[in-house]
Amino acid sequence: MSLVICAPASSAIAKEFDNYDGFLSVFFITVSNLGEIIAPLYIGPLSERFGRVSVCHFFNFSFLIFTMIAGFSNSFAMLIVFRFLAGASVSSICLNPAITGDLFSIEERESAMSLTSLIPILGTAVGPIVGGYVTQYLSWRWTFWLMAIVSASLSVIMAAVLKESYGPVIRRKASRKANSGQEKVKTPPKYLKGWSIETVKALVLLAVRPFVILSNSRIAVLMGLYLALLFAYISLLAATLAAVFQEAYGFSEGQSGLIYIAMREWLFFQTYISYSKHHLDSYRHAHRRSHVSLYTRLLPLSRIFLQAA
């Protein structure tokens, strides 16, 4: 939601800053993706060192601060910097799969991941609609302040209900509560002891491990490249659709936010299909390949129709 809520406001921001650079008008929307790229390199390892909950709360607070400051921006440069920092503080992308893995067995994990992805998809559909009407009737700055308010509210709720799910950290807390005369619960020392050279090495190893796995699997490399292309295309659409409809077809900010519904509804539909097919006995890994292959062919076709429109 934070990525696209400001998309309908791009023209209004360019007008207020008196800067009509087309690149900057798109880059300030997508720059948060750059922050989200590097976030897993430190959020994941830190969550295994300090626990999911502590890291989640810290980066939620950081996201709130950077998003609020972005609303006070007086130039594209300031807006881009704080959008990048806000993107680098998005912990949910890294921690949602980790928490799902902590709580669910391998057999249940696919269904749980499908369900946890529905809310972000819904947020990306609602975000441009809300952002468009907020920009039209209040100010583009309120798109960021509204996100900060929502983030603060959710952070309070999470602080009240979110519990630690990472096993080694839970065992460490249990060992601290144990009486001195009782046998303490053993915990992995490379994650849970104080800062040392070994701890730093372990954190670096955790950050490098995804690249090692990626380099040793051609399938992972190909899927990574395909997903990179897919997300680049989706981000480009998210950043430019509103401005195109405002300039070419005379849409207002509020009306331009409505055009994102179709794209997000399709993603919602595909997530539902993935979840429902998982529960069919006839649905096996071979069927997943045919399912993915079909929509891989539809992507370039949809690009041709969009260009023709």
Image (spheres, grey):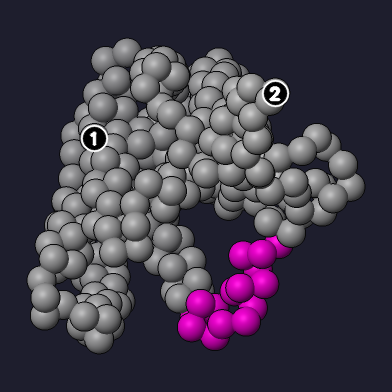
Say if 114 sits above or below 140 in the image.
below
Residue 34 percent coordinates (x, y): 59, 49
Of helix, strand and loop, which one carries label 1?
Answer: helix
Residue 165 percent coordinates (x, y): 46, 39
Q: Which is more foreground, mark 2 or mark 1?
A: 2
Question: Image point 45% across, 61% down: which residue?
Answer: 232
Marking on residue 180: 2
Query: Can residue 277 be seen at all in this image of the molecule?
Result: yes
Name the image quarter holding the C terminus: bottom left
> What residue does disc 1 label?
126
- Quarter holding residue 250: top left
Local packing at callout 2 (Cα closer than 10 Å; few below 14, some 14-19, many 20+) is few
- Extreme front residue here? 181
Question: Image point 64% across, 29% down: which residue?
Answer: 182
The type of residue carrying mark 1 is Val
Question: Image point 82% across, 53% down: which residue?
Answer: 201
Return the disc, 2 or 1, that comes first in the chain's sequence.
Answer: 1
The type of residue carrying mark 2 is Ser
- Viewer-side residue, 286 vs 133: 286
- Viewer-side residue, 42 vs 231: 42
Side of 122 where 64 appears, left or right: right
Cα separation between marks 2 and 1: 53 Å
In the image, the segment drawn in magenta is 208-222
Q: What kind of secondary structure does the magenta stretch mostly adopt?
A: helix
Say if 164 sits above or below 277 in the image.
above
Side of 120 where 270 appears, left or right: left
Any magenta on residue 246?
no
Question: Image point 11% across, 75% down: which residue?
Answer: 281
Query: Can residue 47 be seen at all in this image of the molecule?
Result: no
- Viewer-side residue, 139 vs 172: 172
